[in-house]
Image (spheres, helix red, strand yellow):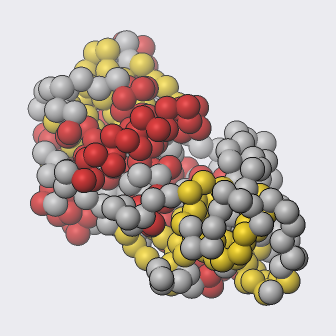
Amino acid sequence: MKSREIHLRKRPAGIPTEDNFALVTVDLPALQDGEVLVQNLWMSVDPYMRGRMDDIESYIPPFQLGEALDGDAVGRVIESKHSDYQVGDRVHHLKGWREYAICCGDGLDEVMHKPELTKIDTTAIPASAYLGVIGMPGRTAYAGLEYVAKILPGETVYISGAAGAVGSAASQIAKLKGCRVVGSAGSNEKVDWLLNELGIDAAINYKTVDNIELAIAEACPHGIDVYFENVGGPQMDAVLNVMNDFGRIALCGLISDYNTMESAVGPKNFAQILTKSLMVKGFIVTEFDARAGEYEKQMAQWIAEGKIKWRETVLNGIESAPQALIGLFKGTNCGKMLVKFSEET
């Protein structure tokens, strides 16, 4: 059986281009005992993948040249030599960037140190949501707000990149927890979505305002208690000046720096962290894997009650996966960026 997959052809300099990837057809080996063959239905692209394209030491190993990339995916079992998995089961795994994946039913993923394969229930929640609002992006939002920043009702929460997969989940979770929520996004369409569909209190198009700090201050007249940081750069400088004393910053991502060819520059007004007694904590969602079940139960309840909305930006076919990843860094997505391989049957 043949499968197409995306390999890393060469390491990028700056924003990746199509030339950094190669679409390769491979022959799949026969299944061994304990293995499962999965036809991928959806795969995720996420900002952290850009860091893995560089040959540097980090919290997660880099992608290897000439080999398939990997990441979150959901699919259906089409052949099984494991008694716990039947043909037709829907599963989540970490072998995206390919049309078919062979997974060990009892194995641990060597990179993420998680089970290679997990069954998912798609009767009430669509399969694609396991890559977004109820998956890693949603868990990241919940962990940053609940476990890192420890938000309280009545506080003002500012979220950069609020229209992305993590930011849009964080915006709604903070509202459900009784906070006043202000977010930033990079287009008027995204601002409208945040205000009119997600129902946050204020939203800023950071690309069109003349003075980002003044815009944030006007949207947060009583200051900012909690900053959920996805972006970094000049927006962080602006927010630090508007933070309240003893504010908390959950540092989730710094996407503005991911493609820079120069050393990233820290906040110009770093002293605000000292003078305002701010707490700044970077975190990786895997730190909270032991509490994933708690989040998934809560999010499933919110979804059933109609309290959570989400959007997906979908590109079709394995060949579109590089374009999807590149699009993250150009802001072409609203909500979760996904690649769709096959229709549900």
Name the residue at 39% across, 54% down: 133
Residue 283, image x, y percentages:
53, 32
Determine if residue 235 is in view: no
Name the residue at 40% across, 73% down: 313
95 displayed left or right of 123: right
Q: Quadrant of the N terminus?
A: bottom right
* Quadrant of the image occupied by residue 189: bottom left
Query: Is residue 251 positioned above or below 334 on the image?
Result: above
240 displayed left or right of 270: left
Name the residue at 24% across, 23% down: 152
Residue 196, image x, y percentages:
12, 60
Determine if residue 40 is in view: yes
Query: Is residue 172 positioned above or below 124 on the image?
Result: above
Residue 54 versus residue 36: which sits nearer the camera?
36
Residue 64, image x, y percentages:
83, 61
* Quadrant of the image occupied by residue 39: bottom right
Residue 80 versus residue 54: which sits nearer the camera?
80
Residue 130 versus residue 143: which sits nearer the camera?
130
Q: Residue furthest front?
A: 83
